[in-house]
Amino acid sequence: MKHNDFKVSYHQFDERPLSDSCWSVQAGPDGRIYIASCIEHTDGESATVVRYNEKTKGLDYLFDLDEVTGDLKDSGRATQCKIHYSFVPDPANDMLYCATHLSGPPKGEDSYNPWAAWHDPVRAFRGSYLASYDTKNDKIKDVELFIPKEGCRCLCLDRERQLLFALTYPRDHFIVYNLKTRKLQDFGRIGSVNSQCIFLGNNGMAYTFADTGQLVRYDIDKRKLQECPLFFPHEKCQNNWHGVLYDAVKDPFQNAIYAVPWKARPHLIRFWPDEGPLGRIEDLGQLTQASDTHFPISVNIGHVGGLVFGHDGFLYYVKSVWPDKKISIGKSKRQSPGLSAILCRMNPVTLRHEEICSLTGGDGPNYYVSRGARDIEGNLYFGKIMASPSGIYRVENKNKDIIQKNNEYLRFWG
C-alpha cells in the first residue's frame, strides 16, 4: 500500500456554523456528491442540502429544507432539521430523493420529545417531507408530506417498481410508498430501536434487521413482512440485542451485501440473499479492536461506518480506534482521549484488511463517520459527526492496485 495514493481533505460547513452532524452522503445520478448539513441540537434551525463542487474544490449550498417544504424553522414546531440516511438516486429520471427527519426542538426550546408532543397542535413535528431534486436542471421538482407526524430514519428505492421503503421514527414502522400512485402503506412496528438502513437484493426483497438482531424482509410478491430465523453475528460477551443494521453496500461483482450493525464491537457480514429460501449470513468477524469485555463500550465510539466500494474493487470503511485496548469506553468523549477515525479497506477476494490513513480536519473530534459515497471519478467522501460545524472528508483515491475494476458508484439506499 502506498499512502500517497490517498489524499485526504476536509470540507467544513462554514456557511452553516450551527451544523452539528452530517448523516447523509450520497452520489447523485449525475455522479456528483450530495450531502446533508444537519442542525439537530439547536432550536429553530433547518437542514441544508449541499453538493461538492469539483471545479472550486468547495461546497455549494443548494437549498434549505424548511424553505422548500414550507415548514419554516421559526414556526414553533419541531424542525425539519436533518436528512438521516435518506438520500436515494434514480438515474432513470435524473432525480435525487431526500426525506427529512426529526429531533430539532421548536424555536425557543432546548429539546424535543416526539412522544410527549404527539398530540400537541402547535409544537408537534408536522412530518417527514419527501423532496425530489432534478439533478440535471438543478431545481426542486416536487415536495410532498411523506410520513405524517414522524421522521424518516432511512430510505431505500426499488427503481423497477418505483417503490420507496422506509422506517419511521419514533414508532419504528416499516412503510412502503408508491411513487406512481403517491400512496403509502404501513406494515406496522418492527421494534423499539430503529434500524439505520434498508437494502435490496436482486430478488426484489427489501431487508433490514430488527432490534432483536433478527433479519426482517419485505416479500415483494406476497406484499408482507417476514421474520427470518437469521441473526446478526456478535461477540461472545454480547447477546442479540441492538443488532440493528447500521450500513450496507452491494458487492458490484456478485449478488452479495456487506453490512455492519449499529452495535459496539461490530461484526462485518456478507449476506447472500439468493442462497436457500431465506438467504445466508456469512460472519466475517469483528472490525474494531479488541477491548476488555468486562467493561461496556459506547456504540458511538466502538463504531464502523462509511461502507463503499472503490473504483479498484476494494471495500472501504471507516472504524474508530483508541490507544488503550483495556480502556473503559463510556458515552463521554472526555473519558476517551486519543480517539480517531481510520480509513480501511478489505480485499473481497482474499478478505484481507488494511489500514489506509487517518481522517482528520475541522473543528471538534474526528472519530465517527456516518456514511460513505464515491463520485464518478472514484474519489471517496465520508460524513463527520460529533462536531460543530460539521463537514465531510474527501479522499482522493489514486490507487492503481485494481482487484476488479468497478464502474458502479450509485447506491440505491441511504
Image (spheres, rainbow, N blue to C red):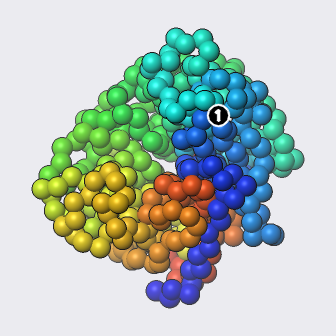
- At which x and y percent is residue 334? 35, 60
Locate the C terminus and report the quarter of the image it occupies: top right
211 vs 47, left or right, is left
Q: Is residue 374 above or below residue 24?
A: below
Image location (x, y in percent) of residue 112 = 50, 28
Residue most extreme to the front: 108
Residue at the (22%, 41%) spot, across then down? 240
Above or below, comparing residue 396 to residue 116 in the picture = below
Q: Secondary structure at mark 1?
A: loop
Q: Is residue 282 visible?
A: no
Front one among 85 and 345: 85
User: Hey, which quadrant is residue 286 in on the image?
Assistant: bottom left
Q: Nearer the viewer, residue 8 or 222?
A: 8
Asked if one can make out residue 18 in the rendered structure from this viewpoint, the answer is yes
* Image coords of residue 344 (percent x, y): 43, 71
Q: Residue at x 51, y 62 (%)?
A: 364
Residue located at (53% from left, 79% from top): 402
* x and y, in percent, of residue 119 in the image: 52, 11
Residue 104 in the image: above or below residue 311? above
Q: Residues within 10 Å of mark 1 (few under 14, many from 20)?
A: many
Q: Nearer the viewer, residue 33 or 326?
A: 326
Determine the image quadrant of residue 368. Answer: bottom left
Report which residue position mark 1 lands on. 44
The residue positioned 74% from the left and 60% from the top of the image is: 59
For badge 1, the amino acid type reads Gly
